[in-house]
Image (cartoon, helix red, strand yellow):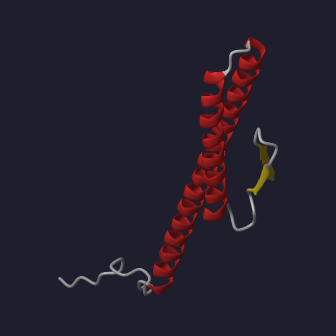
Amino acid sequence: MSLSIASASGTSSNVSAGRSSGPSNSDIAALQKQLKDLTADLKQASAEAGQSSDPSEAKAKQQRMQALQNQIQLVQQQIQAIQQAQQQEQQQKAMEKAMQQMQSAEKKKPPSPPNLGTQVDTYA
């Protein structure tokens, strides 16, 4: 699954999620960098929108700001999804390790003698 977010400046960033080894910290780092860039673009657009005297230009800048906010939200959701996937992967590995330890402990346990205590000789 490949996710692509295009910023308002026309650049795009591809992040691949769902690799066989799972999402990585480098995916998160790339998205965080993209988030930082989008935030900087939004700040700049916000400053420019305040300086606009033409109503149509102000509306265009407002739309650009809304698009940037939407992109920021999408990137934040992607980061959250990757973090959740990593957490699930860690939980799965912990469960598998616990199961292996339980199976290993079962193999190491000496077998109990059959019918121990069921046949008791009593003398009167």
Q: In which quarter of the image is residue 7?
A: top right
The residue lying at 75 percent from left, 66 percent from top is: 20
Residue drawn 60% across the image and 30% down it:
47
Q: In this view, does 60 lie above or below 13?
A: above
What residue sits 45% from the left and 80% below the top?
Answer: 105
Q: Quadrant of the image for the C terminus?
A: bottom left
Residue under the image location 68 percent in, 28 percent down: 65
User: In the current view of this chain or complex, which residue is farthest to the top?
Assistant: 55
Say whether residue 120 is left or right of residue 15: left
Rendered location of residue 73, percent (x, y): 64, 36
* Residue 66, placed above or below residue 96: above
Residue 62 place in picture, x, y as percent: 69, 22
> Which one is nearer the viewer's eye here, 58 or 98?
58
Visible in this render: residue 77? Answer: no
| 104 over 92 or under it: above or below | below
Q: Determine if residue 16 is in view.
A: yes
Q: Tell me where residue 77 sits by quadrant.
A: top right
Residue 80 % position (x, y): 59, 46
Nearer-the-camera pick, 45 or 115: 45
